[in-house]
Image: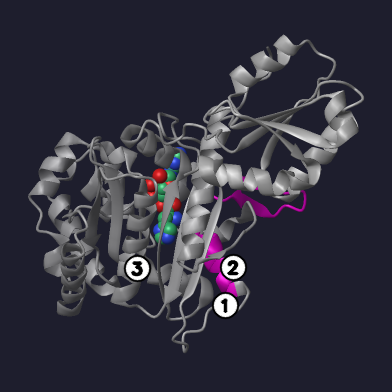
Amino acid sequence: MDYKKPKGTKDIFNIESYKYEKTINILKRVSNNFNYEYIETPIFEYTNLFNRIGESSDIVSKEMYTFKDKSNRSLTLRPEGTASATRLAAENNLLNPKSNDHLKLFYIGDMFRYERPQSGRYRQFKQFGVELYSKPSLSSDIEVVLMINSILKEFNISNYKFIINSIGGEESRKKYVDFIKKELGKNVNLLSDDSKVRINSNPLRILDSKNKRDIELVNKLPSIYDFLSPEEKETFDKICKFLDEYNIKYEIDHLLVRGLDYYNDFVFEVVDESNSSRTNSILGGGRYSTLVKDISGFELSSVGFAIGIQRLINLVENNNPNFYNKEMKNLIYIAPLTEKSLLYSFTIRDLLIKEKFNVNFDLNFDMKMKYYFNKMDKLNPGWSILVGDKDSESNLVTVKNNLTKEIKEVKFNELKSTLTNLMRKNNG
Ligand code: HAM
């Protein structure tokens, strides 16, 4: 076979697509429950928007899919959703720094990063993201943590914890960056090659280096917390206190800086407790005032997070192996046994679809009975309706409950109420 999918991409089909669909439906439902508004942005934007993420971040410097269109415009496939959501909010005048309103948005879409593919890491991947624009406020930070908590509960996940930190506002961060630049600069020869570059371009990222020599040097540095202003410390302490009172499991890690450069103050990730490696964080987010200011010109703040759908599915399956078992209880199998019964069978299906039942309609007719029985065994639907000539002539429907093996003959115009009652009973 000569045709293969590009490296780092994934075909989603069969049970995998069911998992994606179920996961996305739950995420959409919870977002609606929290009253967040669904948005869609283009898959590509002008490159200068994404440069705002931070020119020294890995995403911008190494991982973007950037190309020129036929009019020589530089475009980039979106590597993440925050910059686009903020552009959407600014361009469509949804942001108002004077207002006390909160703009609550969510999105589900494909992101593109030229990364080294590995388990849970793709070059095209689906992300669910949430962005909450408001004046800076403690309650917004807490809101997103609680939303994440509710989401993970919906997936019956309990084996996770938040890793949190405050990286301060611009001023405190600058003081800290200047300090660590000076300190690490004393031992620049001991740093890893990547960190030797980062000491000038993005010193904060050295804090979460996985290199042994870097880690040794970083461990000798004072914590960023010591450089926060009293107000920043107070806000962070209040968030921690709230999480304690709410019984949310978290760990403070003053080395957590996140891979994107646009964050300030509160940042967090969620990790699977059964898998201690930070490379596989399920989700990440934080506050990003500078990005909002850069894109919109407003002194507004925003806090948000994003989850990789595949990473979420992996986590759900680790915690809950049966979560994605396909629910066939409410599926109805309809088989016209003869060509003559085809028209009547389609009419039965129309009625059931109108009533929002899920129907598997068998397009084969005039088959041996063995075929239909084998099909039912394989499919294992909750209900089956085999339509013979006799049924179509007398406007009857023979419904079999595959769970109890009970067979009921009902009139066509009573089918809806009969099935609704029977299903209610079945679903207990
Ligand atoms: P991020 O940490 O770059 O943050 O990505 C968020 C999540 O997307 C990760 O935790 C992971 O689940 C998933 N992810 C990232 N890269 C890949 C990949 N190559 N393959 C599969 N999954 C991946 C952001 O994107 C920020 N925009 C989050 C945010 C929203 N911050 C504020 N608002």
Q: Which of marks 3 and 2 is nearer the N terminus?
A: 2
Three-letter residue code for mark 1:
Leu
Q: Is residue 79 magenta?
A: yes
The kind of residue tagged 2 is: Leu
Pointer 1 local density, CA inside 10 Å: few below 14, some 14–19, many at least 20: few
Disc 2 residue lies near ligand 1 with CB under 8 A: no
In the image, is residue 323 part of the stretch drawn in magenta?
A: no
Residue 375 makes an appearance in the image: yes
- Residue under label 2: 88
Q: Which residue is drawn at 71% across and 50% down?
A: 355
Relative vertical location of residue 133 with respect to residue 9 in this rendering, above or below: below
Between 123 and 216, the one lying in front of the other is 123
> Dot 3 corresponds to which residue?
143
Which span of residues is magenta-colored?
Answer: 66-90
Q: Which colour scheme is used?
A: one colour
Residue position for label 1: 94
Image quarter for residue 55?
bottom left
Residue 110 lies, with reference to residue 303, above or below; the image says: above
Q: Could you tell me if the residues under marks 3 and 2 are in contact, i.e. CB atoms within 8 Å? A: no
Q: Which of marks 3 and 1 is nearer the N terminus?
A: 1
Position of 424 with respect to 242 (left or right) is: right
**Is residue 121 rendered to the left or right of residue 86?**
left
